[in-house]
Amino acid sequence: MRSSRRSGDDFEGFMRELAALVEAAGGEVSGMLVQARERPDHRSYIGRGKINELLHLVEETEADVVVFDGELTPGQLRSLDEQIPIRIMDRTRLILDIFSSRAHSLEGKLQVELATLEYQLPRLIGQGQVLSRTGAGIGTRGLGEQQLELDRRHLRRRISDLKRQLVKVEKTRDLHRKQRLRRGMKTISLVGYTNAGKSSLFNALCQKAHSSGQNQAEADQRLFQTLDTTTRKIKLASGREALLSDTVGFVQDLPPHLIAAFRSTLEEAVAADVVLHIIDVSDEAYFEKVEVVNQVLEELGAKKEQVHMVFNKADKVPEFEWGNGTVPAISALTGQGIPELLSFLEQVLWPD
Ligand SMILES: Nc1nc2c(ncn2[C@@H]2O[C@H](COP(=O)(O)OP(=O)(O)OP(=O)(O)O)[C@@H](O)[C@H]2O)c(=O)[nH]1
Ligand SMILES: [Mg+2]
């Protein structure tokens, strides 16, 4: 279910992405509905007529959940909850659920729980209840159910507790970073839109650059496959070593609570000596996605001169010849352009 924000919006692209997110959360799409209006209805996001249309579609498809693109206000959520007999959730909730099912590290789990609780806090109704059917996620792995009974005060206490724990975890990580700096280790991080091929490139680079350590980055079709940062030491042609990190992907309208919760992780990623912005050139909407990533990078305080665009999946678009000047378009899959990318890294890290 989507409501257009601007005329000329790329409906199909947005709906495709929403569908991919539903699938990433373990759901299956049984129907779609689009509403064309300047801005969402302030009371119930969609208008009266659309609600009837939606009710019909729900009956026809026997769907279990309605997912709204965008973020519903607490009021809209309440109003929809009263009018629609099945579970409803918004895009933010969906992304939070995907993240909560993918977080493995202690820090990742704390960050996702914090973001989820911050999201839930204004959506509690009365004493001790999160809006009835909106609590649980598609795959039931969401944090929803167990939070249902917690009242606001309880939530607030848990939120400050999580923040405290996160500060501790961040301090440890900071310590590690300082140790690395003292050893003079250069750092490279891979950032980009979800599904751009960061983890695939991470593995390809590690293979070509005699990395030490075992952990492989998980590459998969599903969005947000990677949540926890994976770091490995790689050895470049000259024998000099650097640390390469794979990170969580970005997406259009990333929930602000999530950005806030992941801030320290993301800031560390953009503070690397070299930030490679990985772009999927086979994606029709790659241009818009580059913009989304650039915005997040800027917001995180990335320095422009440290960020280098790398055009990936060139194997799928043979006519694509655009490189960034020094690095030709690459393919993490076939290995095309990887040696050039490695020597480029060597040049920027040790310019003399
Ligand atoms: N054809 C082709 N497919 C690629 C290439 N690089 C990655 N892929 C595929 O694209 C999909 C996403 O790759 P990932 O490496 O998981 O992408 P990611 O950027 O790490 O995604 P998230 O962790 O979800 O943010 C996988 O199915 C990969 O096999 C490439 O160069 N060519
Ligand atoms: Mg990944």
Image (spheres, helix red, strand yellow):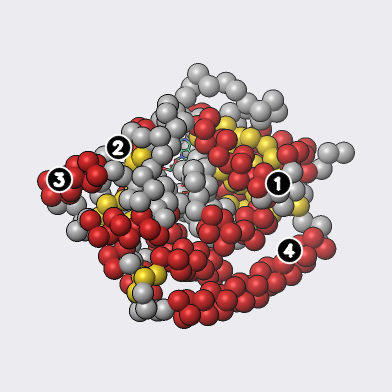
Give the amino acid type for the residue marked by disc 1 in the picture.
Ala
The answer to whether residue 105 is left or right of residue 190 is left
The residue pinned by badge 3 equals 56
The amino acid type of the residue labelled 4 equals Arg
- Where is 23 relative to 146, above or below? above
The answer to whether residue 282 is left or right of residue 230 is left
Mark pair 3, 2: CA separation: 14 Å
Residue located at (18% from left, 45% from top): 52
User: Judging from the image, what secondary structure is the residue with disc 2 in?
Assistant: strand
Q: Find the residue positioned furthest to the top.
A: 319
Q: Position of residue 96 (x, y in %)?
A: 43, 59
> Going 24% across and 42% down the picture, which residue do you hit?
50
The residue where tag 1 is placed is 302
Q: Amino acid at mark 2?
A: Val
Q: Nearer the viewer, residue 112 or 268?
A: 112
Disc assigned to residue 34: 2
Q: Closer to the camera: disc 1 or disc 3?
A: 3
Quadrant of image for the C terminus: top right
